[in-house]
Image: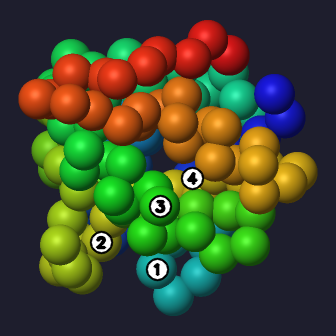
Amino acid sequence: MNAKVAVFAHVNPTEVQEKVEQAILNFFPLSFELQDSAISGLCGEGDFESLRTLHLRLREERILDTARRLFLNGIEGYSTRFRLNKQVAFIGKLNFPAGEESLGSIEVEISADTEDDLLTIIDWLAPQTEDGKPVMEIEL
């Protein structure tokens, strides 16, 4: 399955860059580049394989329904976008913030070659559930 994963997080002057990196690495095994602008930021790109940890953690934390709703609502074209709370990610937990956060969030974009491919990736990451359990798991 072809997919492109792009991750970005601001590194505020009050934050330690290594901690922001660790927050991202807890879910996405990527290499980063530091972007210098008014506020520095870390950006990284990966492929489908960089989604495997997220896939596992969504099940461990039992938040498939929330994740699925966010992934589907975030679709634009052949991509979906969502945010993760940086501070919570640093301790290895997932949290999807409801709005803008004072320190910023980890911004994630997952892109595919076609709409069908994107929906398949979403079905793999966060399948439909019944009583909190996946109705059908697909292997990718």
Mark with earlier residue (1, 4): 4
Which amino acid is tagged 1?
Answer: Ile
User: At x 36% / y 60%, what residue is drawn?
Assistant: 70
Colouring of the image: rainbow
In three-dimensional space, the C-alpha distance between marks 2 and 1, rounded to whole angstroms, equals: 11 Å
Spot the residue most to the top.
139
Give how far across and how far down residue 78 sits, in percent. 75, 63
> Label 1's element?
loop
- Mark closer to the chain start, 3 or 1: 1
Name the residue type under label 2: Gly
Q: Which residue bears the numbered disc 1?
A: 39
Q: To which quarter of the image does residue 128 belong?
A: top left
Residue labelled with disc 3:
72
Identity of the residue drawn at 85% across and 54% down: 114
Query: In the rendered image, which residue does mark 2 sit on?
Result: 104
| Label located before the other in sequence (3 or 2) | 3
